[in-house]
Amino acid sequence: MVFLGMLKRTKPDNIPIELLKPEAPAPPPAPLISAEVLNDLIRQKPANVGAALRGWMANPNAVSKN
């Protein structure tokens, strides 16, 4: 009972809030690749497609950043 009486009489402290501005801008979104561009890349270097597919099969959660 004593504790509840003390709890009712106490007031919460004011907590200062500081808004932070981001220091670096977000990177631009990756450009979308059309089917035509993708087909041209495959025709030019089919070995790259094979290597990418083997890498994805070995680690399906990995994403290439090339």
Image: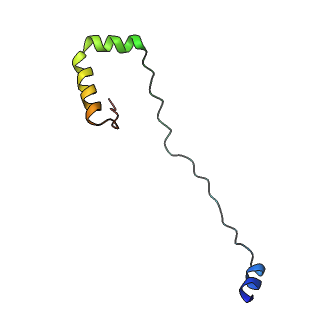
Q: Residue furthest bottom?
A: 2
Residue 30 in which image quadrant? top left
Between 55 and 12, the one lying in front of the other is: 55
- The mark total stands at 0
Query: What residue sits 75% from the left and 75% below the top?
Result: 11
Residue 22 percent across, percent down from the top left: 53, 46
Please indicate whether residue 57 sits to the left or right of residue 30 in the image: left
Q: Compare residues 13 and 43 and report the one nearer the observer.
A: 43
Residue 60 picture location, percent across and down: 32, 35
- Taking 28 as reference, is 33 above or below it? above
Q: Position of residue 24 (x, y in %)?
A: 48, 42
Image quarter hosting the N terminus? bottom right
- Location of residue 16 (image quadrant): bottom right
Q: Quadrant of residue 62?
A: top left
Q: How is the image coloured?
A: rainbow
Q: Residue, x 48% and y 31% (percent of image)?
A: 28
Tell me which residue sits at (25%, 35%) in the image.
58
- Residue 28, relative to residue 8: is it above or below? above
Q: Which residue sits at x=74%, y=89%?
A: 2
Residue 10: x and y in percent read 74, 79
Whether residue 48 is situated above or below residue 7 in the rendered picture:
above
Q: Is residue 50 left or right of residue 34?
A: left
Choose between 1 and 13: the one closer to the eye.
Answer: 1
Image quadrant occupied by the C terminus: top left
